[in-house]
Amino acid sequence: MTVLVLGDGLLRKRGPVARRPDEPILLIEAESFARRLPYHPHKLTVVFSAMRHFRDELRERGRTVRYYQAESFDEGLRRYFADHPRDELVAMRPASANGAERFDDLVTDHGGTIEFVENELFLCSPEEFDEWAGDREGYRHEEFYRFMRTKTGYLMDGDEPVGGEWNYDEENRETPDAEFSAPEPPAFPPDETTEAVAEWVEKSFDGGYDDPPCGGDWADPEPFRWPVTRAAALDALEAFCTDRLPAFGPYQDAMVEDEWGMYHALLSPALNIGLLHPTEVVERVIEAGEDDAVPLNSVEGFVRQVIGWREFVRHVYRREMPDLGEANQLDAEQDLPPAYWTGDTRMNCLHESVEGVRERGYAHHIQRLMVLSNFGLLYGVEPAQLNRWFHAGFVDAYHWVTTPNVVEMGLFGSGIFATKPYAASANYINKMSDYCSGCEYYHTKTTGEGACPFNALYWDFLDRNGDELRDNHRMGLVYSHLDNKDDSELNAIRERAETLRERARRGEL
Ligand code: FAD
Ligand code: SF4
């Protein structure tokens, strides 16, 4: 019996690695897997370097670790079973759709067997979620979140939420003033192992994609900075609790030029590969919240993201694939504009958000939702294309987490859990950021040269999708504003939107 550990399941103290301390461990670095999309080099470096560190740490502790570097999982498993015929493998069930079935087929082809056990990267088991979901129609996050609070007992006072409210989002919408400056995000400079991986990634994958959509790539990122060891991930958690947690809540929805991390945790890359477990992260944050300097709205806001949203999207994905991956209820069919790859656009908000992805594989939540997805939604990008871009570009991206976030939350692909599209004009971006003051476009103008693209595209989006959205009771007010526009105004909006789409296609927005 051997424990197979996948690159996004590097748990040491849980799962089969911990439960079977006497069994050997198998890891396979599969190059072709990393070639399926034009992944950001920092994402590949995170995964491969973390795997090699995991191997070295376990070996130091006396575990037998068999490590194969192969062109593909198929080749790696063929070599493994040639060395260890008919071995029985045990592994955590992969979170990606069909992952278990694909491995099962490969292992069986090479004469072995594989047993999948629960994926302990999460707090809520499939059985618990399925029981909670019951025969509900659609999924409501707020209900699930309350279920999770009650189940875990986090921030609970008996049966009641600590402080009397379940959710303090109302207090989490502060906008930064001109003096705003967030603490410098922690950086974990590469050690020898990481440097070797980064060089290999650059050599093996640079230009190694035959057809990156729109001819883009992730050239010239900043120096690598992400945690790839357990110790560094724990340091990142401490840095968050000390430096940024107190203001996390109030500035959760804010965006500021040149402040790429704001007060966000920057922990998703480590959480999503198992360097940190959600339990320890949430418990450390709750403990930090015992300090009077840390307000409840920050702690609750963070806990909600981790025990609520992260678990919720994982299970919605598990239950709704494969349909969710292809969902496109608004029939959006535009190709992703080249600016998503090049960052070349005069739209300051889009430029800043894309540059963050190009430089370090990261944009914070509100940039992801209200700039990168919002623009895609209004412009009419085909959801599967934007999903691939997010999956390729972000250091924390895996199919189980991008698909519900991009296809459903960002682009309203199916309505399975979003009750309305997150569509917003420049008004929202101007309120929540300082981007508009440094932009060549006028956030107050809708049509005519120099008008902010978000505005015409916003009204055009509502106009084009009236059949699907008009009857949504949460959209009543915005449709009443649309209906107040006369024909000439509407025609000017439609024309402007078409001009903007043409320019975006040419990379001239
Ligand atoms: P913080 O803002 O500090 O939040 C704390 C933690 O909460 C995160 O680390 C994450 O683990 C969790 N979290 C918060 N919101 C979500 C959510 N909606 N889904 C899952 N986890 C959540 N998250 C990813 O981990 N990988 C992705 O590829 C990803 N793609 C996204 C794409 C879009 C369009 C949107 C709207 C959201 C996406 N998210 C993704 C969710 C969220 O934006 C990121 O988890 C967060 O920005 C990561 O940065 P952070 O650690 O600084 O998070
Ligand atoms: Fe973005 Fe429009 Fe504001 Fe420019 S004016 S930053 S394009 S919202």
Image (spheres, grey):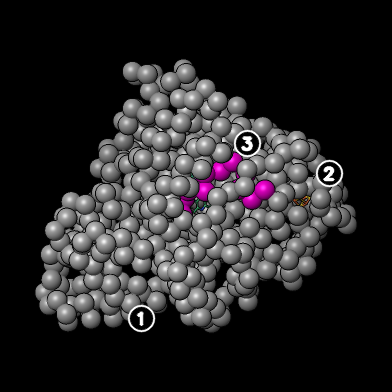
Q: Reading the chain from its start, which is encountered first: label 1 or label 2?
A: 1
* Residue found at the very far right of the displayed protein: 449
Q: Is mark 1 within 8 Å of ligand 1?
A: no
Dot 2 crowding, Cα within 10 Å, few <14, some 14–19, many 20+: some
Real-space Cα separation, disc 2 to disc 3, in angstroms: 24 Å
Which residue type carries mark 2?
A: Thr
- Which residue position is annotated with label 1? 71
Real-space Cα separation, disc 1 to disc 3, in angstroms: 44 Å
- Label 1 element class: loop
Q: Is residue 452 visible?
A: yes
Counting the numbered discs, the total is 3
- Label 3 element class: loop
Q: Position of residue 418 (x, y in %)?
A: 51, 42
172 up-or-down from 116: above or below:
above
- Which residue position is annotated with label 3? 251
224 up-or-down from 249: above or below:
below
Which residue type carries mark 1?
A: Glu
**Quarter of the view holding residue 440:** bottom right
State the mark number for residue 444. Answer: 2
Residue extent of the magenta highlight: 259-269
